[in-house]
Amino acid sequence: MATVVSLEGKRKAPSLEPLLSLCAEDMARVDREIVARMRSPIALIPELANHLVGAGGKRMRPLLTVAAARLCGYDADDDRHVKLATCVEFIHSATLLHDDVVDVSALRRGKPTANSVWGDKASVLVGDFLFTRSFELMVDVGSLEILRILCNASSTIAEGEVLQLVTQRDISTPEATYLEVIKAKTARLFAAASEVGAMVAGCKPAERVALESFGMNLGIAFQLVDDALDYAGREAKLGKTVGDDFREGKITLPVILSFLRGRAVEREFWKRTIEKLDQQPGDLEQAQGLIERHNAVSDTFERARHYGAMARDALGLFADTPLKAAMLEAVDFAIDRAH
Amino acid sequence: MATVVSLEGKRKAPSLEPLLSLCAEDMARVDREIVARMRSPIALIPELANHLVGAGGKRMRPLLTVAAARLCGYDADDDRHVKLATCVEFIHSATLLHDDVVDVSALRRGKPTANSVWGDKASVLVGDFLFTRSFELMVDVGSLEILRILCNASSTIAEGEVLQLVTQRDISTPEATYLEVIKAKTARLFAAASEVGAMVAGCKPAERVALESFGMNLGIAFQLVDDALDYAGREAKLGKTVGDDFREGKITLPVILSFLRGRAVEREFWKRTIEKLDQQPGDLEQAQGLIERHNAVSDTFERARHYGAMARDALGLFADTPLKAAMLEAVDFAIDRAH
C-alpha cells in the first residue's frame, strides 16, 4: 500500500477516483434520487437536508452499495440498487444530524453544521424525517430480507450512539469496548450497505458474506483513520476541525493507547482533560505530544491497516476486474486519505 | 354524549374501561412485547425508555390496533397484532422523546420528562433506538403493504413536527394549517394504528377504509381536546402542566380563534406573548380570560365533537357488538376525559 508519493512519482497515492468513475452513472442516479426524496412542501426540510446531504461528502456508503451490486453482476433494468444506495445515505445523514446535536459540533466537512445554522430542534426533526424516508425507500425495494438487514443496522447504530454516550469521558474504556462502539456506529452500516448491494444483485450466499465482511472491515478501518486524523490531520485538507474529539472528551484509540502506555503524571493529564473536560490553552498540543511519544496515532493507523487487509482479502473469491481493483484501491484510499 | 354526571347518576361519564377490559388479554401481551423489545445490553436504553413507555399513558394507539384487529375478526393464533400494536407505541414514544427535547418540556403525564432526567442527548439517541425497533417490529410482521402504511405515517409525523416548528409563534397561522399540523402529528398515527389492525385481520377493503377514517377522526378530536385542555384543564387531573403551550408560544386552536375574534388591543397581547414570547406574571391568566370571553375553548371542544361524530359514523358498517360499543364509548371518552 502506497503511503508516500515518492519524488520520482513511482508510487501513486491511492485514490477513490477509479471507483467513482466506474460507478459514475449509478452515482448520478443516486444524486437525483436523493434530491427527489428530500422534497417536501415544508421548505425547511429540503433546505436543511440539502445543506448536509447535497454538498460535500464522498458518498462512501452509497458508493459501496452500487459497487457491490455491480461486482455481483447486477444488470436489472430498474433502480432498486439506486434506491438502496439512497436509503443508506439517508440513514447516514440522519445519524449525522443527530450526532452533531448530541456532540454540539460547529463544523462538519469544513462547513457550519446544520444545528449551528438552523438550531438543534430543526436538526433533530429533519433527522427524523430523513430516517423515515430511508425506511420508505427500503420498503419500495420490496425485499423483506433486505429490510431486515437495514433495519437491524439502523438499530445497531442507535444502540452504538447510546453506548458511546455512556462510555464518553471514561478514560479507562478498554480498546475492546471502543471497537464495539465503532463497529456499531460506523462499520455496521458499511457492512449493510455492501451486503444489500450484493443481495439486490441476486448474488450467491458466499458473495453476500464476502461483501458484508468487506464492508465491515472497511468501515472499522475508516473510523480508526478518522479518529487518528482528529489528532494528526491538517484542518484544511480534512475539512473538519482538528481536536474536535479532544475538546468533546471523546474516547478514541489514540487516547486509549496513550493513557495505557503513559506514566502516572500523563494519566493525570488525560483524566483532567478528557474525564473532567478541564482544558486549558496548550492542552491539545500537549495531548498531541503525548500521542506522538507513544506512537498512538501511528499504531491506530497500523490497526486500520490490519482491518484494511481483511477487507481486501474478503474480495478474494471475485474475479479480477477493473471494478474489483477499484474497490481494493478504495480500501487503501480510506486508510491513506490524509497523507 | 354525556359531559356532566348528574346528581341522580342517570348519565355516566364515558370511559375507556369497557374497551380496555375487552382488550385486556391482548394489551397484556403488548405490555410484555414492549418490555422484551426495549431490552439492550446498554442499561441506559431500557432505563430511559421504560421511564416513558413503561409507566403512565393510556396506550390509546396500541389499543386502537388490537381493537381494530378484533373488530375485523382477527383470530389467528399468532402475535402479529401484538407486534403491530407495540410498533405503533414505539413510534409514538420515539416522537414524544424528541418532542420533549424540541419543546424543552419538563413534565409529561405529571412526571419529569426523560430529557429533564437524563439530558437531551440521551433522549435523542434513545428516541432513535425506539424508532429503529419499531421498524424491526413491522418487518417481523412481514407484510409490505402494512410496512408502507406505517412508514408513511412515520414520515408524515416527522414532516408535521417540522411544519409545527416552522409555524411556531406565527400568530396568523390559519385554522387550516393548524389542522394540517395535528393531522400529521397526531391523527395520522391513530389512523395507521387502526388501519393496520384491520389489515392484519385480513379485513375487507371497506372495513379498512372505515377503520382508517375512524382512527383519523378520533385522532383529530383527541388532539383538539388536548390543546383545549392546555388552557382549561386542571393540572392534577391531567398530569400535564397547564399553560405549557402558552409558555412555548405554540399556536393551537384556542389561541387562533381568540386572535381572530379579538380586538386590536387583544391581538397586540397575543403578538407580544406568543410571537415575541415576552411574557409576564399574570399573562397566562389573561390569556385564559380572553379565550373564555371568545368561547375559544368551548368552540375547540365543539370542533372536536364534529370529528368525534365522524369517527363514530365510520364504524356504521360493523355489526353492533360489545366491542363496537366500547370503541364508540372510547370516542366519547377522548372528548370528555377532563370533565
Image: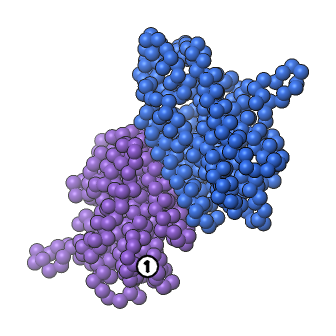
Chain colours: A blue, B purple
The quadrant of the rendering that contains the N terminus of chain A is top right
- Asked if residue A328 is positioned above or below residue A229 in the image, the reply reads below
A11 or B22, which is in the foreground?
Answer: A11
A240 or A202, which is in the foreground?
Answer: A202
Residue located 47% across and 18% down the image: A270
Name the secondary structure under disc 1. loop
Residue located 40% across and 82% down the image: B72
The quadrant of the rendering that contains the C terminus of chain A is top right
Question: Can the viewer see residue B300 in this picture?
Answer: no
Question: Can the viewer see residue B51 in this picture?
Answer: yes
Q: Position of residue B223 (x, y in %)?
A: 39, 64
Q: Residue furthest right?
A: A8
| Disc 1 packing (10 Å; few <14; some 14–19; many ≥20) | many
- Kindly identify the amino acid type of the residue bearing the numbered disc 1: Ala
Residue located 50% across and 17% down the image: A261
Q: Position of residue B138 (x, y in %)?
A: 48, 64
Parent chain of label 1: B
Residue behind mark 1 = B201
B146 or B41, which is in the foreground?
Answer: B41
